Image: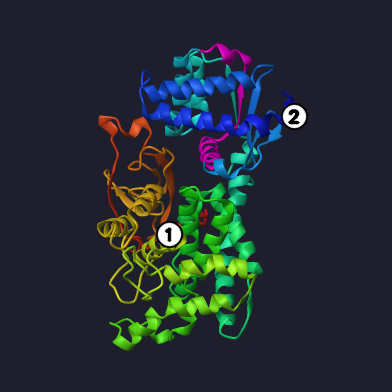
Amino acid sequence: MQRSSLADRLGHDFLRALYHLIHTARIYQDNNQLSRKSVRSFQAILNEMTADQDLNLVFWRGRFHIGGEKLPYRRDTSGIVRGMADFFTRRGMMSVNFLQSARNVPPDGILTFARLMSDSIRYSDPQKWLAQKLAEEKIVWIQIVRKPAEETADGGGSESRRFTQARNAYAHAVETVMEVANKASQGLVGVRKSRRLAQGIVDLVQEAPALMIGLSTIKDYDDYTYTHSVNVALLSTCLGRHIGLSDFALEHLAVCGLFHDLGKVGVAKDVLLKKGKLTDDEWDQMRAHPLIGVKQILMLNAPQSLRSKIILGPFEHHLNPNMTGYPKTLFMDQISLLGKILHVTDVYEALTAQRAYRVRAYTPDEALRMMWREKGEKFDTILLKCFIDMMGVYPIGSVVELSDRQIGLVMDYPDETDRMRPLILLLVADDQGSFQRGEMINLSDPQWQADERQLTIMRGVPPERFHINAAEYFLHIS
């Protein structure tokens, strides 16, 4: 076997075997049949790839490199690659070196290594804890390299760059949706800028999904129609990524999210912003906006192949799985996947926003509970379950009250297996009646689960009660 073909021939098989090893070791005991099978599969591919020399697996700038070669894209393994990229990113890992001595490791040693890799996320410094545990277990056949300081530091490194990119992308997205909406009623509108924007959203979602979910908490009441469309695009792309859609499908999904309410350009503004109950005629105007949106998308100056891919989701985003909702149609008996995704994210975003016709916005956890009660009837059950799994019991961006009465903001769920114990940014009240960034604590850390220091989330809190803008904290705005 030529070394130059290593990544192309065996890279995806190796990453798949490592992925299944880590996930089965996390769930099952050593003597479980699935655990043993995953160990055998991993050892077989590892032995083949370390026959001549050590094996180096590097995660750099969002891509895996194996044996010095970039892992080529393959659609059938894209979900696994994204899952492993997320795994490495959360733990701050840049590379894992498997020495040739790994060929002689017994199955129990392989499982111990996999569990330590998984468990490291529970600690504030995963790399330090992992290095200590590997030394204690005498696991010397593997070397793990953390990302350089400039790649993980907030100041001037990739995190700072990511926040800047996210903030700029959001502002640009709102401007683009506004521009398209304003021009839509005047004639043909180009879609090239929107496609570039969608590609940027997909890249950011792949790199930092928690940040993009947090960013979707922006609620600009003056331009809510536009921020709502951008938030739906972000949430939809995150959900599409979560269920393993390809980058191409994610791009189309992002465009659908941006344009899903384009038809509201044909609805009178006093109807859109009305505080009281809508009349029958006003409801007819509102129910017409998906069909108006289809007409506007058909007028976009874009290839027919693209228009055909982005027209169905906006048309369907108010239809339920049982085909109730609107617009009424006789030529369809089921909704497309993109339509189902848009329906879930559109309703969630609307429930968590302050609207003129209700007293307050629902907290994210309240919104999810309401939606779950209507699973099957109004939402695809499997897809809604995936959405809740992605968002967490208390979704990213939730303001919560802890059992010690402190107020915090849910920032992420770094432990993929525990959706009750997220990463929390404590919010500390100052003398001006606002909140400053406090300590970051991971509720999955064993120190917060011990009986004498147990810390849990008591309830979600409406952010407006404390005048908290969640998105500011995600973007490190002080």
* Picture layout, residue 119 above or below residue 202: above
Type of secondary structure dominating the magenta stretch: helix
Label 1: few (<14), some (14–19) or many (≥20) C-alpha neighbours in 10 Å: many
Percent position (x, y) of residue 460? Answer: 30, 54
Q: Is residue 138 left or right of residue 383?
A: right
Give the mark, 1 or 2, whose residue is nearer the N terminus.
Answer: 2
Q: Nearer the viewer, residue 394 or 229?
A: 229
Position above or below: 24 against 161: above
- Residues rendered magenta in the picture: 80-105
| Residue located at (43% from left, 42% from top) | 440
Q: Residue at 69%, 16% (x, y): give it.
A: 52
Instruction: Indicate left or right for 11 with 356 as reference.
Output: right
Disc 2: which residue: 4
Q: Which mark is residue 341?
A: 1
Residue 101 lies in the magenta-colored region? yes
In the current view of this chain or complex, which residue is farthest to the front? 331
Q: Position of residue 354 (x, y in %)?
A: 36, 69
Q: CA distance from mark 1 to mark 2?
A: 41 Å
The residue tagged with tag 2: helix, strand or loop? helix
In the rendered image, the vertical position of residue 120 relative to residue 305, given as above or below: above
Task: Identify the coloring.
Answer: rainbow
Query: Going by the picture, which residue comes out furthest to the bottom?
Result: 281
Q: Is residue 350 visible?
A: yes
Residue 39 screen position, x and y as percent = 47, 21
Q: Secondary structure at mark 1?
A: helix
Q: Amino acid at mark 2?
A: Ser
